[in-house]
Amino acid sequence: MADVKILPLIEGPDDLKLLSYEQLDCLANEIRMEMIETVSRNGGHLASSLGAVEITLAVHRVIDSPHDHLIFDVGHQCYAHKILTGRYDAFPTLRRFGGISGFPKREESPHDVHDSGHASDSLSTALGVAVARDLDGGDERIVVIIGDAAISGGMAFEAMNQIGARRTKMTIVLNDNEMSIGRNVGALSLYLGKTRLSQGYTITRDVLEGRMSSMGRVGRTMVDVGEAFKDSFKKLVVPGTFFEDIGITYVGPIDGHDIRSLEEALNAAQEAEGPVLIHAITVKGKGYLPAEEHPERFHGVGPFDVDTGKSLSAKGAARTFTQAFSDHLVERAEKDDSIVAITAAMSSGTGLTAFRERWPKRFFDVGIAEEHAVTFASGLAIGGKRPIVAIYSTFLQRAFDQTIINVALQKLPVVFAVDRAGLVGADGPTHHGMFDLVYLGAIPGMTLLAPATPDELERALDYALAHTAGPVAVRYPRGSGDALPENPAAGAWEMARGVCYRRGGDVALLALGKMVAPALAAADILASRGIEALVYDMRFAKPVDVDAVKEALATPLIVTLEDGVVAGGFNAQVARAVEDLTTPGKIGRVRVLPLGLPDTFVEQGNDEELFGSVGLLPDQIAGRIAQVLEKQA
């Protein structure tokens, strides 16, 4: 029996209640091996999920899911949960096209309470679920698992304020691994660090834990100690009582890899009145040495060799947009000491590591606080600095108001480096940068650039830094993109000037950013059918190149191509230019055909699968254009 694997026998969370602690430890190891093997093939968020295995097992031992609710923050830690809730057989399809998502997803399982993917939203969601329960007189137990980085986000603070004030019954498990995607920053991180390192508290905690063990119940011991002792003694030995002071009972820190201790704390929390926070100390990447030694690299990782932990990406791969941004920003900052760089807990992902190492005093990681990052940048600009705010497109959505009010309204020269624009692959709908062309394009005074290649990104950044009349956003995709033909006209960027790559009178293709290469490939296919296309790399999403639109008006069909949602995107800017350039009622046979992402959320998969699913591969583009031209004939 010792060789029999336990994991294949687990059909759902209820089966965990039948296992001994020794069997649970074996199961934890099996789950980790399943994660490592799958993520080594598919890529994914490995280190966070490895660190949360025992917490997940303990929670599912205590609650009755899906009647009770386990709510994850971000979802980076949810792999064990997926495996234990009926998705073990499907787990090899993780993050693949048509497979299971890398994040909790309501339509995938009744055990997934909400679709997560952005940090710091779990507590607000949990409070809403809990209040709905209370209004209906329900008895559902609610447990939230949130990381030490996510709990520092402003939205989490807002939720905790109301949770503590209402004394809403729920259990919050703070998974404290001392690592976010990058090392944590900020006052709360320092507070948690002091709690971890306080020798006086540790000694006293050990004594109290001994008493708890002898008495059999954590909760009864907490009551026996008494409120007066807690208020007077705990404030002496714990560096701060933040959670207690806002009305949330604090338990910990405890070993987040000790299932028995976790289970006892969770059971005690269920008996307590009001909200309880269990502070669990874990190791990010637990059980896989390469991930333990390099948790930042294994936070979000591509396919890798299990034995060595080394990436399987092709050697000599083309330079990525992010690398081009990183290299060129360092070059520019070397010559201009007014340049400062800001990120929101994503220094590595946004390519700012080299800048941070070269100019640590000019680099600012504000933590998971995009709203603050943008407003902070506005203040730096007011103070005469040239701030570069590097944030993924999907996360910049959180700072829409600040971008309008604190930056654009004041015409401040803040540069937004909008990484991961467009479809980003296996991370799926919560991470696709589908909307930046809409929300940035709607802001008065915003200049919006979309380079088609990493080399073009360098020139776009030069333009952005030279532009001082207001904010500039430079959006660019993940990866390296496709090379474009040599073009003598593709020199330095000029305001609202695109580059013509092909002349033709049958149709005009006005392409933006990543869609320039597919547009050129589609033009080749059309040419083989006797249809000659005018092709422009428009460069500017806003303001658009009016001369290019004038030239396009000489053809019977204008096609806009963008890797963002069609509704209100780049095509709307072109349509407005067409309207301005034509006499009302005399547009004639000219029609604008917008090709981009549909009015729906796009699932996960690789680039070819995703672009194929939305009809943006070259042969699909050519087929659609030929069909429209045939109807117009």
Image (cartoon, rainbow, N blue to C red):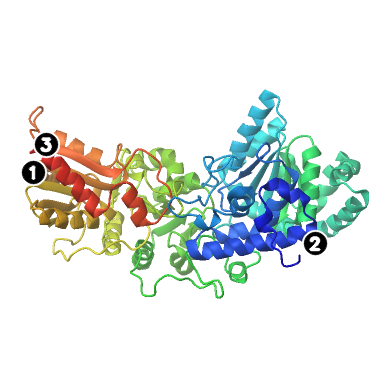
| Residue found at x 34% / y 42% | 440
Instruction: Using the image as rendered, state which of residue 12 and residue 390 is in the foreground.
Output: 12
| Residue found at x 31% / y 61% | 481
Tag 3: residue type?
Leu
Q: Are marks 1 and 2 in contact (CB under 8 Å)?
A: no
Tag 2: residue type?
Gln
Tag 2: Cα neighbours inside 10 Å, few (<14), some, or many (≥20)?
few
Tag 1: residue type?
Thr
Q: Are marks 2 and 3 in contact (CB under 8 Å)?
A: no
Marks 2/3: CA–CA distance = 73 Å
Q: Which residue is mark 1?
A: 555
Quarter where residue 578 is shown: top left
Marks 3/1: CA–CA distance = 14 Å
Residue 581: assigned label: 3
Q: Secondary structure at mark 2?
A: helix
Q: Is residue 259 positioned above or below 132 on the image?
A: below
| Residue found at x 29% / y 60% | 457
Marks 1/2: CA–CA distance = 77 Å
Residue 199: assigned label: 2
Q: Nearer the viewer, mark 3 or mark 1?
A: 1
Q: Position of residue 392 (x, y in %)?
A: 42, 52
Tag 1: Cα neighbours inside 10 Å, few (<14), some, or many (≥20)?
some
In the shown orientation, is residue 620 left or right of residue 405?
left
Q: Is the N terminus in the top left, top right, bottom left or bottom right quadrant?
A: bottom right
Ranked by sequence position, the earlier of labels 2 and 3 is 2
Q: Position of residue 409 (x, y in %)?
A: 35, 38
